Amino acid sequence: MAKSLTQEFVKGLWDEVPPFRLVLGLCPVLAVTKSVENGIGMGLATTFVLVGSNVLVSALRKIIPSKVRIACYIVIIATFVTVVELLMQAYVYGLFLKLGIFIPLIVVNCIVLGRAEAFASKNGPVRSLLDGLGIGLGFTLSLATLGAVRELLGTGALTIWKDWGLAFDIFGPAYKPFSFMVEAPGAFMALGLLLCFMNLAAKK
Amino acid sequence: MREMIKMVVILTILSCFSGGVLAYLRNSTQERIDNQVLEFVKGPAVRTIFEGAGNNPIADRFTLKDGDVERTFFVAVYDGEPSSIAFETSGKGYGGEVGVMVGINVKDDQLMGVGVTTHAETPGMGAKAKSDPTFVSQFKDLPATEPVKVTADGGSINAISGATITSRAVSAATTTAGQIYQKLKPQIDDQLKGFKK
């Protein structure tokens, strides 16, 4: 029953990877994955919130009265989200402008509240930290993968982190962009196809 | 009863703690955020107006009180002299206020150029005021001391086709800027004199 610490971390990367396995938190998944960079930025912001709230919820789990636990979790999560928002404005303003409303919306991301309620409130801080980190990185990887598929087909380029010069024009100027992929319907299709491939791979 | 008090106390403590942390963080990042906003929102317009300036106009700025409003002035250095300023005004456009950065050469009171910073105009029509440089380039070298008007109103600015309201908004904002400039000129000159390059 009890999992090892490594398992707690690794499960978030494949077995319970939020958007693909649990099909949770789809709002940002569909909305921000126009490029790899946006996906990574959103994923890392969520990871930070997830790790912070998981650790704090877990540390306070014996003090928080069960009747107001959701209110307490929301206060904790909202604090971390505001921290991320301020830090992003101060240091990566360009990315903040692109992600816009989806950063404050991490507060109501069901992955974050879900982990607090389902995991951190029942486990110790170390386990919760690893759980948050695993789920968060899994989320980041999913967003980056989805972003890569959409950006590559939709624009023919890959932007991993523009400020560091990690932007590549993969297919070159001759490529006719399949711009449908960077629009909203493309997000649903790409997500559906990725879900399909993941289920196929897991079946074997 | 005891349980209820406990709930209230814990939620209050948690909220106070959270408020405190955020207030502290907000204080310590405020300056950086302000800089970033200037850099990303106003920066592109300022840099276009002051192309070839010998300094960084975003970093070299001062504020002046204009009635109740505090205005930020960006200073550009040409040939070793702080000779131009730029500041933002706005005019009523088709989709709301159109923010316009207006650059003025204080030596001869001529417009250095204007640039749209924020707007909610129709893409492909009014939004061209920002994306199409040929429209704003008409403002260059006009006297800042006289009202700027589009040709339909008897002025010299050719409006963007299909976007007369937006063109008027930019002209009106420029005219406002000229008036503010004339009103504040003594203070602006004072600030520029004390300006070290």
Image: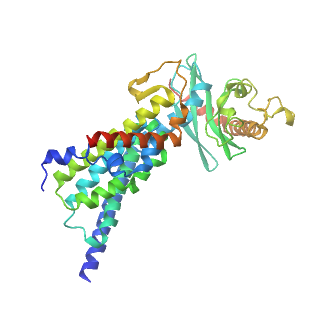
Q: Nearer the viewer, residue B126 or A186?
A: A186
On the picture, is A172 further left or further right than A62? right
Asked which quadrant contains residue B49, the reply is top right
On the picture, is B114 further left or further right than A183? right
Q: Residue at x 32, y 48 (%)?
A: A21
- Percent coordinates x, y for residue A1 in the rendering: 12, 56
On the picture, is A100 further left or further right than B52? left
| Residue B14 seen in the current view | yes
**Residue found at the far top of this picture:** B79
| Residue A99 seen in the current view | no
Asked which quadrant contains residue A163, the reply is top left
Q: Residue at x 37, y 43 (%)?
A: A195
Q: Nearer the viewer, residue B158 or A113?
A: A113
Q: Residue at x 13, y 51 (%)?
A: A3
- Percent coordinates x, y for residue A162 in the rendering: 42, 28
Tell me if residue B68 comes above or below residue A166 in the rendering: below
Q: How is the image coloured?
A: rainbow
- Percent coordinates x, y for residue A167 in the rendering: 42, 24
Q: Nearer the viewer, residue A118 or B182?
A: A118
- Percent coordinates x, y for residue A132 in the rendering: 25, 49
Tell me if residue B156 comes above or below residue A63 in the rendering: above
Q: Nearer the viewer, residue A45 or A91?
A: A45
**Residue found at the far front of this picture:** A204
